[in-house]
Image (spheres, helix red, strand yellow):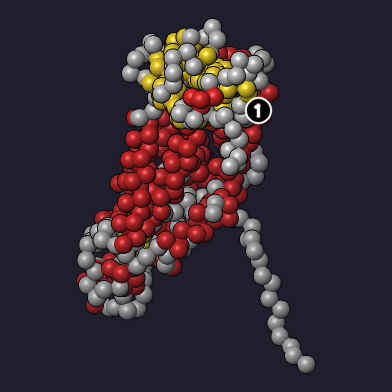
Amino acid sequence: MTTGTTHTIKFYDKAQPIVTRSVKGKFRNFKSFVLVLAYSIYFGLPWLPWHRIDAASQAVMFDLDSRRFFIFDLVVYPQNVFWLAILLFIAAVILFFATTLIGRAFCGYFCFQTLWTDLFIWVEQFIQGERPARLRLKKQAWDAEKILKVGGTHLVWLLIAFWTGMTFVLYYGYAPDLLHRFFIGQAATAAYIGVIGLMLSTYAAAAFMREQICAYVCPYGRFQSVMYEAETLAVAYDVRRGEGEKGRISPKGDLKDRTNRVAQGHGDCIDCGFCVQVCPAGIDIREGLQYRCISCGLCIDACNNIMDSMGYPQGLIRYDSEANLAQDKPKPAAVSWKRWKVAGYLTAILVMTAGLFYSVHERTEFEVSVQQIRQPLFVILSSGEVRNRYQIHLTNKTDHNVVYSITAKNLPANALDIGAMQNVTVHSGKSVIVQASVKLQPELADKYKNFEFVIQSLTNPADKSVEAASFYNEHPDTN
């Protein structure tokens, strides 16, 4: 009979609220710069005017009614969906490229979760005070002060979350008009669902879940480790310098002096815990590289501040690679570019970006497709002529009306019949279908099996499209 101790495996530990301390330094300054820039773009773009003739004067607008996306002077139609596919591919490869070089820097500085959590923490600090004051407030009974401060914090959070959702919806219509209709109850149902849904999700993610999103929800935090290499830069603690032979110790008495610490076998880390207190993920970087670490660099700022106050060299915690830290005498940290993986990612980014720009640059101001009507494939008229019919689908992608002419190349005169529509006017952003037919005498049918439709813009002669077509006088499977 076998006996033993029963162990309970937990797949999820109840979150302990992390109360962070503010810190000053170059990485905090960079995070603040990115935060201000990102919010200026996100909240400001719907209100940026942009002159348009046939649509709202808004710089960026996703007009679902007309099925057009306006991005400054670029108009994107459903036919251009492959641009989105290329753009998503480029974004993914840039993420992999950056991770291989500098770890989870995207998470630490540019991720939406990081940006909104940063803002919510700043509001919390502004209303409730620095970390010690907030810890005291958590233990305090529910009196008037606590109700006012905690309630005020959540009220501001909800207002930020609401405006986050509202701004997202404003991208899908003319912002001033949509905002007015929203508050008088005349907006579309989807607008209210979108605002409420995004408000609640933003509030939950940035106010309560915070680091739990990075640890349990975001897949990137899990699979990013497979992209790390020994040369990848990441936030790291210099164990040899920090621990020495006898480990870290607080600076008491003669141990304040670095020379004495080294002589007694102690490292530079004074075990202040400042690096842990500023970490938004609540980890101790001194325990080594961890998947929860988002590489925000705040612990570097905290440690450098302490090193400055003690008169010790900075860099006990720094961006560095495992390969460099493993050397007997580590060199100054540097990005390692000379790797096949890095070269492959960079090549993919450059090639796909060039392809995207080429496609956008070479786009025409109209879309055209020619389809042969195959039921029936051909008709023999009473005159003995053979007739084939075609549908020409024209889409005007400009912001003004355009007149097009439709002719046929490599066909006899008068073989093409498009009825009364010799010239076709297509309104801005609209499409038309032109019915065309080609009639040939039987003895000429074999001679003109292949020809071309020429669609020419009369408004802008530079716009022309040549579409290949075929003429049939017998079924293709006939021998």
Q: How far from the left and from the top, in percent, is residue 403? A: 44, 10
7, above or below 465, in the image = below
Residue under numbered circle 1: 376
Label 1: how many Cα within 10 Å (few below 14, some 14–19, many 20+): few
In the rendered view, would you say 368 is above or below 287?
above
Residue at 57% across / 19% down in the picture? 385
Whether residue 122 is visible, yes or no, is: no
Is 181 situated above or below 238? above
> Percent from the top left, x then y, of residue 128?
52, 39
The residue sitting at the top extreme is 420
Which quarter of the figure has residue 166? top right
Residue drawn at x 38%, y 21% is 464
Residue in view at x 39 percent, y 11 percent? 458
Q: Nearer the viewer, residue 296 or 356?
A: 356
Circle 1 — which element? loop
Taking the view exactly as shown, the residue that stands out farthest to the right is 1
Which quadrant is the N terminus positioned in?
bottom right
Residue placed most toward the observer, 119 or 125: 119
Q: How many marks?
A: 1
Q: Give the residue at x 32% y 46%.
A: 350
Left or right of residue 164: residue 29: left
Question: Can the viewer see residue 236 in this picture?
Answer: yes
Q: Is residue 15 above or below residue 25?
A: below
Q: Position of residue 388 (x, y in %)?
A: 57, 24
Q: Amino acid at mark 1?
A: Pro
- Locate residue 115, reporting x and y percent: 46, 41
Query: Looking at the image, which residue sits at the far front?
Result: 443
Locate the C terminus by quadrant: top right
Query: Taking 2 as reference, is 298 left or right?
Result: left
